[in-house]
Amino acid sequence: MTGPADKGLEAADRAGLEAAHVRLLAEARYRASIYLPVMEPGVLDSDAALAELRRLATSGRHARIRILTHDANRAHREGHRLLALVQRLPTAVAIRVPTDETHLHYPSAFTTADDAGAYLFRPVFSRFEAEGSLDAPGQTSRLLAYFDEVWERSEAAWEIRPLGI
């Protein structure tokens, strides 16, 4: 793991990946974009990661967390803890599912702190190995451009919307 003054992020296992996510999310002020093809348990569901996401979602009127996943039904069935945040704060946190078959075969996962120029990238989403940086606006912009393209061609994950009872 990298030191506190170091701007690099890396992970080799589940614990390292969660720690890297927490460091990255701590850098974000208002916006984050998360591409998780599969919302597996142990990724972005620790108390520390959820606390950072909650802080970000309630950081002000410009707060926005966008999540793309290929299978929101599975995440809902398996009770991924991130979905509770989506349901409690629907104006700040949105989740969508890509509809284009090409995007459904995207092999990687990544998280960006859009307003901080920070990113964490996993080349193979089913593995915990990741690398990134807290200061890489160029790479963050490239990932965000892809995210935006997929986001525009995605549908809201209606199965996890909050119930207005």
Image: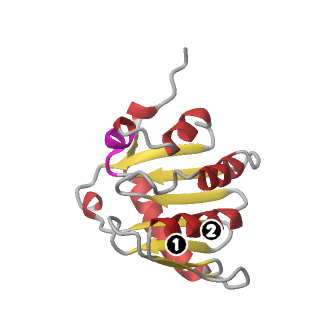
State the SS at label 1.
strand
- Disc on the earlier residue, 2 or 1: 2
- Residue 135: x and y in percent read 65, 81
Q: Can residue 119 be seen at all in this image of the molecule?
A: yes
| Gap between marks 2 and 1 measured at Cα | 7 Å
In the image: residue 162, left or right of residue 91: left
| Residue type, mark 1 in image | Leu
> Which region shows up in magenta?
70-75
Which residue in the structure is indicated by mark 1? 120
**Vertically, is 123 above or below 90?**
below
Percent coordinates x, y for residue 159 in the rendering: 38, 32
Question: In the image, residue 99 lies at what x, y percent?
Answer: 29, 49
Q: Position of residue 148 (x, y in %)?
A: 47, 61
Question: Residue shown at 61%/82% (left/top)?
Answer: 2
Q: Secondary structure at mark 2?
A: helix
Which residue is painted at 67% across and 54% down in the image? 52
Horizontal relation, residue 81 to residue 62: left or right: left
Q: Quadrant of the N terminus?
A: bottom right
- Side of 22 where 98 appears, left or right: left
Q: State the image quarter where residue 160 is shown.
A: top left
| 5 vs 44: above or below | below
Residue nearest the observer in this picture, 100 or 27: 27
* Residue in the image at 61% along x and 79% along y: 137
Magenta span includes 155: no
Q: Nearer the viewer, residue 102 or 57?
A: 57
- Residue matched to label 2: 24
**Which mark is drawn over residue 93?**
none
Is residue 144 something that shows in the picture? no
Q: Are marks 2 and 1 in contact (CB under 8 Å)?
A: yes
Q: Which residue, as the protein is rendered here, is positioned at the far top?
A: 165
